[in-house]
Amino acid sequence: MDFKPVRRIVTGHDTAGRAIIQDDSAVPRVQRVGGAIGPLFHEVWNTQATPAPIDVASGEPPEAGVVLAPPHNGTRIRVLDIPPEGDGIRTMTPEEAAAHFAEVGAGHASNAAKAGARHALMHRTETIDYGIVIEGELVLIMDEGETTVYPGDIVIQRGTNHGWANRSDRNCRIAFILIDGVFAPELMA
């Protein structure tokens, strides 16, 4: 499958403090996770502190590779291209699922091995995530219940165990804004 590049326009300031377009190009960090059956991650931007520093002409804080969660006290925006789900995901073992998440530094997030897991790619992160479907559709699977999300729908994911299934016959493109969070003590288990 060919995917349209994600365009990123970054604004900044020149040395006189005037607003400028600092960069206008395709997202520079793109990585497929989980082999041919996995999603394509377009890493758009991250911040590594809250409040985020705004200065004259810095760029995106450097990162090595693709990491699922945002930096500590930071944020992340990414676009995912999620292909239609096939047997490779439907028959995935918990160990294979954990390996997929390990590719993005989050093997611990995988919950496929937990009793009652409703999907091979069930996972949980200590984040608040805003997911905005751009094209296609996805099924959001929770421990209890599921719903289909369509273009323009927005999901607010609050550190809950969940999975995504593309049960359609075409790609789904979804943008995620991830914000570092902290679980309340009663949710630590």
Image (cartoon, grey):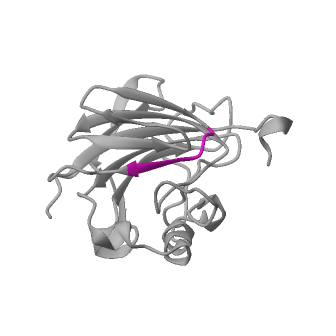
The foreground one among 80 and 153 is: 153
Q: Is residue 129 magenta?
A: no
The foreground one among 188 and 176 is: 188
Q: Is residue 161 magenta?
A: yes
Q: Residue at x 43, y 40 (%)?
A: 176
Q: Residue at x 30, y 35 (%)?
A: 133
Identify the image quadrant of residue 110: bottom right
Furthest residue toward right: 185
Residue 141 placement, left or right of 89: right
Q: Which residues are magenta?
A: 159-164
The answer to whether 45 is drawn above or below residue 96 in the figure is above
Residue 68 placement, left or right of 7: right
Q: Residue at x 32, y 26 (%)?
A: 153
**x then y, percent, for residue 2:** 14, 62
**x then y, percent, for residue 126:** 67, 44
Residue 55 placement, left or right of 82: right
The answer to whether 27 is drawn above or below residue 114 in the figure is above
Identify the image quadrant of residue 115: bottom right
Furthest residue toward front: 116
The foreground one among 13 and 39 is: 39
The answer to whether 86 is drawn above or below residue 170 in the figure is below
**x then y, percent, for residue 148:** 32, 35
Q: Is residue 31 visible to us here?
A: yes
